[in-house]
Each structure stands twice: as C-alpha cells, then as structure tokens.
Amino acid sequence: MSVDRSVEDLLRELAPQVLGALVRRYGVFDACEDAVQEALLAAALQWPSEGTPDNPRGWLVTVASRKLVDQVRSEQARRRREDRIALATPQAELLSHAADAEPGTDRDDSLALLLLCCHPALSDPSRIALTLRAVGGLTTAQIAAAFLVPEATMAQRISRAKQTVKTSGTPLRMPEAADQAERLDAVLHVLYLIFNEGYTATGGADLTAPALSAEAIRLTRLLRRLLPDDGEVAGLLALMLLTDARRPARTGPGGDLVPLAEQDRGRWDRRLVTEGIDLISRTLPRGQVGPYQLQAAIAAVHAEAGHVDATDWPQILVLYGLLERIAPNPMVTLNRVVAVAMVHGPDAGLDLLATLESDRRLARHHRLLATRAHLLELRGEHAAAADAYRDAARRTTSAPERRHLTSRAARLVAGRN
C-alpha cells in the first residue's frame, strides 16, 4: 500500500495524541493501542482519495473509539469485557464525538504516553519496541525490520510489553514530581538507544539504519515541544542533529565505514550542524548541565572544525572530564582515552586504556580493541596494531565495521612489506 507522504506524516504526528486520548478515557492500554492502529489504517486508506477531514485528530479519536467498542462487544459473550469500558462510560459519550468535532477538546497526552511506554517494569528492548509502536506509529513489521528480528518475535515482545503495562495498572497521567525526573531519564535513554541503533547498527550488512535515526529525531523534537525548557531534552536533540549531520560522509561508495578523521566534512549536512550548534549554544548557559548537553557540546566542537587538524582537542578533553565526573561510564572513559592521546600523546592514551582492561563490561569489547590498535598505530607499532585491529574485527557484529577494521590491519601489514 502506497500512502501519500503528507498523510503519512500527519498520521505519525497524531498517533500518540489519539492513543493518549483513548487511554486516558478508557484506561485499557492494549485494547486502545489496537483500536488506534485500526483507525490509522482506515485513515491511510481513505484520506488520500476522499480528502483529509477538517479535524483529523477528532476523526481518528471517533473511529478508534468505535473500533474499541466493536472490539469489546465482539468479546462480550466470551469474556464480558464490555463492563470494563462501556459500563464505565455512558453510551452517548462513546459515540457522541463527530468525525469533525471541534479541535482542542482533548488535551495532548503525548508526554504521559511516552512516560508510560518507558515503564520501569519494562526492559530497554521492550521500552524501545513499545515506544516505536505506540508513540512512533510504526508497524510491527517496520520495527522488526529495523532491528533485524522476525516479525513474530517483535510481535511477541510488543504484546508482552503491553501486557506488563496493563498488569501494572499504571494510569495515563504524569507521575508525581519525585518519580517524573527518573521516568524522563528513561525516555531520553530510550530515544538515545533508538538513535544510536540507527546511526551505527549493532548487526547486519549495513552500517546505518537511517529511518530509525530519523524516527528518534522526530520523537525527540516532539518531546522538546512538550518540554521546551528542559536542558537535557534540548541537549539530546542537539546531539542527534550534530551526529546525524555526519551521515552522508560516514560511508564510502561501497557502503564501507569512513572514520571521523577521514571524512569529507564538505559532505556534512550544514543545516543540521547549524541547528545543532545553535541549540546547544542557547541551552548550555541556562542552568545545570547534564550528560546529553556535554555530549552535544563535544559534537559541536568537532562540527566547528573545518578539518580534523583544526579540532580543539584540549577543549574536548575538558568536556570528557566533566562528562566522566557527572556520568561515569566505561564507554565515556574510552572516548576520553582518544582525547588524552590527541592532547598528550599515544603513550598517555595507552596508560589510561590499561585501566579499562579490568572492567568486564568493556575488556574484550571491539571498540576498546580498535582504540588500542589506533594508539599503537600512532606509536608506530604496526605489527601489534594490525593484530589488535584483527582482534577487534573478530568481535564486532557489524559487517561494515568488520571490513573497515580488517582493511586497517591489511594496510599496516602491506606497509611493512
């Protein structure tokens, strides 16, 4: 089925608003989500030929409500589930909203819906799947394809996630102030994971999955619209924009990885660079700085350098020091290793790298091995560097990364012969 792009974009924008309205009204997340998906499908089939209603959100709420009532009634004889919805809501209320009812009668519950999809009882993979399905409006098949798993597997994951939310009995409302910050952190983390999977896929033949990164950016823009004064939301959006700006230069003609130092910066998306730098520049001075803002600031320093040799590595090193202090993480330390090496030389970088080798989360990770190889190459130890590149290649699950690391090793060996 081919859907007009403008209609598709509108449906993606309205999906969380419609689902939020239904869940707030009827309180059964799983059934409401199914009903909304049916309404979105009906709109995708009707609107391109019949025209978009004057109030598309009202149309979708009305159709989804009727789908929900039909679903409940069809199971009445078997489960008598109608009592859970129809008896709790006057019949007139279920059917009273006309397809073109006046806009603005239902508030936008998109933020509450995002928080619900990132429920503490769910694992990160389940949070990601449910967010993409319920808030992103992606089909199960699209989500499965993005994460390279069978559709049936993803369907089970989404079904279990919806059942967990249902069992928890958590209503669609903003958490208490004490819990809201923690839940928002979970939402930001999920969006960050979605973006990263799209920017550097953990497996498969392709280095990137652009549609997944684009969806993460779209959802983060939505979150920023809902929370315009939150510095970390702005920081995450700026980080995504500045990172995604490099995408055109990240791969060569054959799809092989091109590292940052070797990229043609003229191919970076200057519109995204400008937007990202402007956003983080306005955000940093406003208040308490968080990890996403610091990562965005680091990305901005890279973006401001017209050539790799113009990179302000001392500033990047300071920023990584701050990041490591407020959000200690072995991957942050690994990134600081590179900055240390660029400022103080490869020996200093290798000394810091040695402190990570006892961390079981990272000791045999391909990124640590690739970093060691790079530092050994800078030191002129080409044989040891080639071995480390090959070791890293064996441990990555990304085919483009494996080819890149193998190629680096072969280049060093050829240079010695």
Image (cartoon, helix red, strand yellow):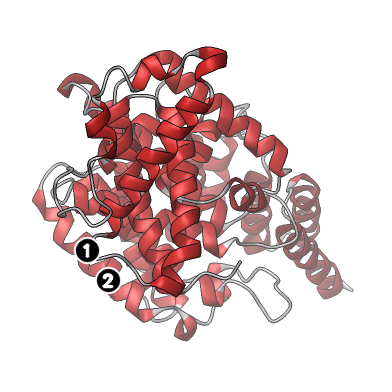
Q: Please determine whether, in this image, residue 68 is positioned above or below residue 293.
A: above
Asked if one can make out residue 15 in the rendered structure from this viewpoint, the answer is yes
Label 1: which residue? 279
Which x, y percent locates residue 42?
48, 55
Q: Quadrant of residue 400?
A: bottom right
Q: Is residue 350 above or below residue 50?
A: above
The x, y position of residue 159, in whole percent, is 57, 29
Per the rendering, the mark at residue 117 is none
Image position of 207 (left or right of 150): left
Q: Position of residue 162 (x, y in %)?
A: 49, 27
Amino acid at dot 2? Glu
**Figure quadrant of residue 361:** top right
To which residue does mark 2 refer? 275
In percent of width and height, residue 77 lies at 54, 16
The residue positioned farthest toward the right in the image shown: 417
The span from disc 1 to disc 2 (Cα, nearest Å) is 6 Å
Q: In the displayed image of the protein, which residue is found farthest to the left?
A: 286
Q: Residue, x 41% and y 28% (percent of image)?
A: 29
| Element type at mark 2 | helix
Q: Are marks 1 and 2 in contact (CB under 8 Å)?
A: yes
Which of the 4 image quarters holds residue 81?
A: top left
Q: Is residue 388 left or right of residue 339?
A: right
Which quarter of the figure is the C terminus placed in? Answer: bottom right
Task: Name the quadrant of the N terminus.
Answer: bottom right
Q: Is residue 25 left or right of residue 295?
A: left
Residue type for callout 1: Leu
Q: What number of labels is visible?
A: 2
Q: Residue at x 23, y 25 (%)?
A: 90
Q: Is residue 235 visible?
A: no
Q: Quick one: 327 or 223, which is closer to the camera? A: 223
